[in-house]
């Protein structure tokens, strides 16, 4: 029997017009962003009317003893204030095609340009918020400001900072940094450790109930104080952003797991024991941002170790109000190519202008209650005239084992 076979060129090829796009995680910082003074990441719009940089005034509380019946004249307290500068830069991207390529397209791939560009912008902002939280504060404009690639993250990027710059950041912020589960890991009454030596002593110390509480105490006791994200009936709440691995350790910690299991609603849709979501413990909202671990694997691997080792340190960020500022010069808008070769070339793009800066203050400036300038050399706990202190955040470093 002679069976008729179908020639290769005559075989049916079915093309679907539904296009599958790679998953892009939404900006997990979004619920904590807003224009109000109480936002963790404050959105500012003043630069929409023009300007390359924004000055943000910061004022600390009064600390003097005041007077009872004694003479108040001449004993007034100076208001400690500082103007923090934030710079913006442009972010632009585009895709292009021609009529010749569109004619060949079976699924309108170029039709995905706008959602793809939108996803690109969301990822960029999310990753740059993380980079800003880790950057070393600087009073100077970003190194790549206005270059071809631009630099919207203010300060000195962690991956490009020198060892000396990272150590200066640690000395300036020694009361709002925690390595593992002991303050002595990075300072004592006479010495501040280097970043490298501090990281080397936290092997096996994970993010747990105990270390979450220590991070919260740092926020409560440092000077200037870190204002809680919110207060309710006399209770204070902070937000802790953690990467995939440190969040895993917090979620599997017995104390935190028990608290979330027993003290929160037990339905599958609301309890993070059953459903992926924020943990809560002792007034701290623990939110997972997987891209923190991704940046440790990538841009920051030279400091924290690569993903090929069994474990390494990872940063977490315990935040109060005004941890960072996102200064917008132009919100994202679509753009279109004009040089279209008589309509043969089609180009679609996106452009926006913003700067993202970790809030910081040059602190202290005067000894409280006096008109005497503090020593420019600071002291064993940092705090000289040139100190740039992060305003609304405690940075923690913990051991994180990688998946085998």
Image (spheres, grey):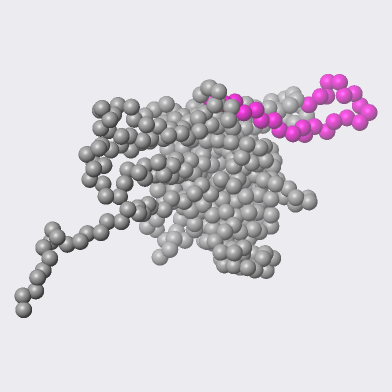
Task: Left or right? Give the position of 348 relative to 282.
Answer: left
**In this picture, residue 106 sits left or right of residue 269:** left
- Magenta-drawn segment: 53-77
Numbered-mark total: 0
For the residue pair 199 and 5, the one nearer the viewer reads as 5
> Looking at this rendering, what residue extends furthest in the left direction?
2
Res. 243 in view: yes
Residue 112 inside the magenta-drawn segment: no
Asked which quadrant contains residue 58, the reply is: top right
Q: In this view, does 222 lie to the left or right of 199?
A: right
Residue 268, x across and y down, in percent: 59, 67
Question: Is residue 84 placed above or below 399 in the rendered structure?
Answer: above
Identify the residue at image location x=67%, y=40%: 38
Task: Kindly identify the residue that appears in the image at 87 percent across and 24 percent down.
Answer: 72
**x then y, percent, for residue 76:** 81, 24
Q: Nearer the viewer, residue 284 or 78?
A: 284
The secondary structure that most of the magenta stretch takes on is: loop
Question: Which residue extends farthest bottom?
Answer: 1
User: On screen, 162 above or below 140?
Assistant: below
- Residue occupying the far top of the picture: 74
Q: Quadrant of residue 45?
A: top right
Magenta region includes residue 74: yes
Q: Residue at x 75, y 31 (%)?
A: 368
Quadrant into which the N terminus falls: bottom left
Q: Where is residue 105 in the image (x, y as percent from the top left)?
A: 26, 46
What x and y, as percent, mark residue 57? 65, 28
Q: Can residue 259 be seen in this view?
A: no
Q: As rendered, which of 248 and 192 lies closer to the eye? A: 248
Image quadrant in which the C terminus is located:
bottom left
Residue beneath the point at 26% across and 42% down: 102
Query: Does 250 appear above or below 217?
Result: below
């Amino acid at each position: 029997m002679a069976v008729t076979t179908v020639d290769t060129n005559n075989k049916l090829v079915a093309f679907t017009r539904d296009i599958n796009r790679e998953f892009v995680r939404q900006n997990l910082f979004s619920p904590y962003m807003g224009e109000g003074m109480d936002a963790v990441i404050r959105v500012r719009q003043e630069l929409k009317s023009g300007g390359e940089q924004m000055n943000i005034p910061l004022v600390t509380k009064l600390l003097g003893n005041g007077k009872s019946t004694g003479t108040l004249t001449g004993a007034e307290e100076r208001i400690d204030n500082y103007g923090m500068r934030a710079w913006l830069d442009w972010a632009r991207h585009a895709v292009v095609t021609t009529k010749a390529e569109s004619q060949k397209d079976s699924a309108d791939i170029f039709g995905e340009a706008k959602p793809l560009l939108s996803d690109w912008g969301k990822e960029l902002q999310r990753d740059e918020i993380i980079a800003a939280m880790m950057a070393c504060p600087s009073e100077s404009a970003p190194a790549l400001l206005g270059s071809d690639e631009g630099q919207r993250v203010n300060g000195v990027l962690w991956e490009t900072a020198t060892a000396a710059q990272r150590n200066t950041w640690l000395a300036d912020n020694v009361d709002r940094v925690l390595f593992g589960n002991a303050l002595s890991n990075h300072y004592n009454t006479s010495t501040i450790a280097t970043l490298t030596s501090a990281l080397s002593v936290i092997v096996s110390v994970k993010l747990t109930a105990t270390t979450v509480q220590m991070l919260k105490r740092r926020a409560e006791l440092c000077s200037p104080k870190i204002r809680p994200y919110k207060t309710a009936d006399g209770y204070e709440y902070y937000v802790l952003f953690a990467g995939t691995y440190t969040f895993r350790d917090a979620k599997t910690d017995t104390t935190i797991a028990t608290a979330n299991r027993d003290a929160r609603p037990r339905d599958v849709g609301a309890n993070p024991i059953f459903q992926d979501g924020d943990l809560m413990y002792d007034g701290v909202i623990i939110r997972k941002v997987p891209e923190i671990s991704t940046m440790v694997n990538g841009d920051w691997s030279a400091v924290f170790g690569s993903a090929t080792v069994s474990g390494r340190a990872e940063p977490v960020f315990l935040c109060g109000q005004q941890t960072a500022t996102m200064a917008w010069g132009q919100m994202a808008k679509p753009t279109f190519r004009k040089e279209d070769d008589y309509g043969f070339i089609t180009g679609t793009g996106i452009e926006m202008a913003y700067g993202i800066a970790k809030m910081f203050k040059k602190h202290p400036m005067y000894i409280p209650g006096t008109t005497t300038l503090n020593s420019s050399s600071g002291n064993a706990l940092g705090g000289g005239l040139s100190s740039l202190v992060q305003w609304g955040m405690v940075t923690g470093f913990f051991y994180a084992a990688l998946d085998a």
